[in-house]
Amino acid sequence: MGTGSIILLIVVAVLVLLVFYGIAVYNGLVSGRNQVEAAWGQIDVQLKRRHDLIPNLVEVVKDYMDYEQETLQQVIQARNGAVAAGGQSREAAIGAEGVLGAALGRLFALVENYPDLKANENVQRLMEELATTENRIAFSRQHYNDSVMSMNTRVESFPSNIVANSFGFIRAPYFEVPEAETAPVKVDLR
Amino acid sequence: MAGAPEGRHSNPAPGIRRTDFHAAIRRNERNTVWLCLVMVLIGGAFGYAIGWSAEIVTLDAGRAGPAPLSVMEALTYPSPWGGTGAAIMVIVSALWVMVTLFAGDRILLALAGAREVSAEAEPVLHNVVEEMALASGLPKPRVFVLESPALNAFATGLRPEKSAVAVTRGLLADLKRNELQGVVAHEMSHIANNDILYATAVGVVVGLIALVSDALFRGLRRGAFRSSGRSRSKGGGAAVVLALVVLLVFAILAPLAARLVQMAISREREYLADATAVKFTRDPLGLIGALEKIDGTKQRFQGANRAIQHLFIANPFRKFGARDSALLSTHPPTPARIERLRDLG
């Protein structure tokens, strides 16, 4: 075997390795993009869950909280606003959810003042449901942002960015926490 | 503690030093890879030693006249039998691991006496598991309760789709919601990090090494009896003695070394699961609180057995008050785990 054919063999081997590497990177990017989309879908599911729960909560709570009608009214309004905004743009939805989160936070704080209410089994169950829903929204948003971060890292860093750019993979946007929601709603029933 | 502080988390909780849990996760993954390589090396070396000894003894017996193999010759001999032995060890391990993985993992839950609970019966536990499933992006595992006042929990499932989390009744009663969340996050980290797979595979290799060593001992003893019967004047050059000594040393040390590495891997995976749990909850204080309560309790979980001890959140057999070195423990001492958790935030 001459020197020429050895060089040719090496070149072919390197090319084959490069192609395999490219395929691996491409598949990684596809699964990254799918993960980002799945995570985005989860947030929607949890927001819907939040909207469905609120009327029940208000129904149970309002008998106990005669003097807090204003807060309850705000929660209802914010909830309806969020439902309406859900059909519009993504930005509008995020803003409306922020308002709702803040209103719920005030309600949670008020419930602390009503020992009877806190002792009610129905209320306890609903509050746990709402607490878990708030957590689920936060965790699915966190998972979404984690997925976006690893996706964006792959899209931007060398050498995977070469594959990403040639197949049109782009940066995904982060789900920024709305201003009103940065003050955490702490619900600890125990 | 390694890992550069990162400015991403603006408000660390009080008592938490700022360190990046991503760095902690990478460090643990690296350590595990090294330990697994060492494990394969131990198995391979053991296989080689067996093949090599057998070949030396055979070669020596085959040599006519008063010219036995010298020690130097034996030591530098590149033994094809040894290579075969090493290959057999590695291949048999791989096959056995695969068989074990296909055999399923139902047994574990039955062993510990776990009972599946519905979302209606245990709403908070189910909610916490669901939350952690969302945080990790894993499918929600099945939820089990162990009717025991002890404080412990474990996870099982070789694949995330078929996983389960079990916690004791005592844990449900004594822990606050965010502490329970920390425990569940730790267990789901074991699922997310494929630790059940790791533990199974490593356990199989350790078992195989122990089995081979056992068989060797038995064989050597029988061989010794037989050769003591006849006169030893004919065979038994220095090389043969060397080969037998090496074999004996390997038969003694290989299972021990494998066991030590297995425990080191298990402890590394515990630290990793703690770091991953914080990645999921972003609340190290929950897991710290839970670990402190678990460490403080006198109750030991009765249903545990040695086959599944590495899957629990805290070692069900050992009590770590102080920093006992515990080379043979599946879990790091709890104070050390809390110390590392305080570095995350």
Image (tube, coloured by chain):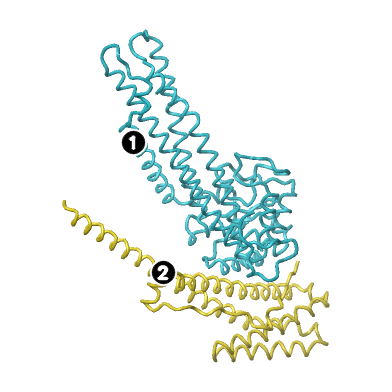
Chain colours: A yellow, B cyan
Rendered-image quadrant of the C terminus of chain B: bottom right
Local SS, label 1 = helix
Q: How many marks?
A: 2
The residue at 48%/55% (across/down) is B158
Residue B148 in picture, x, y percent from top left: 68, 50
- Position of residue B332 relative to residue B343, above or below, is above
Q: Residues within 10 Å of mark 1 (few under 14, many from 20)?
A: some
User: Along the line of sight, which residue is nearer the eye, B30 or B304?
Assistant: B30
User: Along the line of sight, which residue is nearer the eye, A12 or A138?
Assistant: A12
The answer, for residue A55, to whether it is visible in the render is: no
The answer, for residue B26, to whether it is visible in the render is: yes
Taking B101 as reference, is B261 left or right?
A: right
Residue A104, quarter of the rendered image: bottom right
Residue position marked by numbered label 1 in the rendering: B83
Given contact means CB atoms under 8 Å apart, are the residues at marks 2 and 1 in contact?
Answer: no
Residue B15, quarter of the rendered image: bottom right
Taking B201 as reference, is A62 left or right?
A: right
Residue position marked by numbered label 2 in the rendering: A160
Rendered-image quadrant of the N terminus of chain B: bottom right
Q: Are marks 2 and 1 on the same chain?
A: no
**Amino acid type, label 2:** Ser
**Amino acid type, label 1:** Gly
Callout 2: chain: A
